[in-house]
Structures are given as C-alpha cells and as structure tokens.
Image: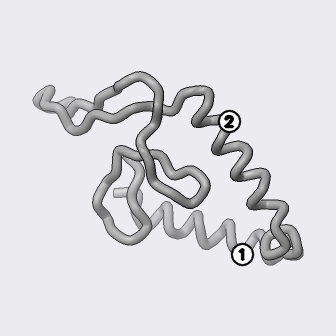
Amino acid sequence: MPYHASSLLPTTELYIAGHWRAGHGPLTASYNPADGSLNAEWRMADAADVDEAVQAADQAWRKADWAGLYPHQWARVLQNIARLIESHQE
C-alpha cells in the first residue's frame, strides 16, 4: 500500500495532481496470507483516473522548476526519491 509522505500510515487513496483521493475503479482488497484476514479495501484507478494522472504529470514536468533542471539535477531528485522508497520498504 502507498504511504502518505507525512507519516508511515498506509493510505488506500491515489495521489494525483498533488492530492490524495479515492479511485473510481473497482473495489479490491488485500488479505493477510498467513491467516486470510482482511488488511484493507480500496478503489482502484479507472481509465479517467489514469488520464488525469498522466495529464497532471505532463503539466508538472513542463513547469520551469522541473523542465529547467539539468540532467544531473534530475538524477539527484530521482536518487532522493529512490532513497525514500528504500527507507520505507518494510
């Protein structure tokens, strides 16, 4: 499950255009494989959610604060993201 950046609490929401919100797709669930108990239920993204996310990403990378960076600066940002992901992998 994804995590809110401000905490280690899992969320069942999608992060699109800088905001957390529920998806509009089918309901899905995660179960504990050890005992079959329900971990969480959430709505998956539908085609409209994906289109919105792609449009938001396209607009974001074209902004001067990202598009104006040099490749080594992009690499630094992406390496920091990778470190954050690794630090929360548990």
Q: Residue flagged by tag 2: what amino acid is it? A: Asp
Secondary structure of the residue carrying numbered label 2:
helix
Residue sitting at x 33%, y 68%: 7
Q: Residue flagged by tag 1: what amino acid is it? A: Arg
Q: Is residue 14 above or below residue 84?
A: above
Q: Which residue is mark 1?
A: 76
Q: Is residue 72 above or below residue 57?
A: below
Residue sitting at x 61%, y 72%: 80
Residue 64 spot, x, y in % from top left:
85, 73
Secondary structure of the residue carrying numbered label 1:
helix
Identify the image quadrant of residue 43. Answer: top left
Residue sitting at x 78%, y 56%: 59
**Mark found first going from the N terminus, 2 or 1:** 2
Q: Is residue 69 above or below residue 4?
A: below
Residue depth check, mark 2 versus mark 1: number of the one nearer the observer: 2
Q: Which residue is mark 2?
A: 51
Residue sitting at x 40%, y 46%: 13
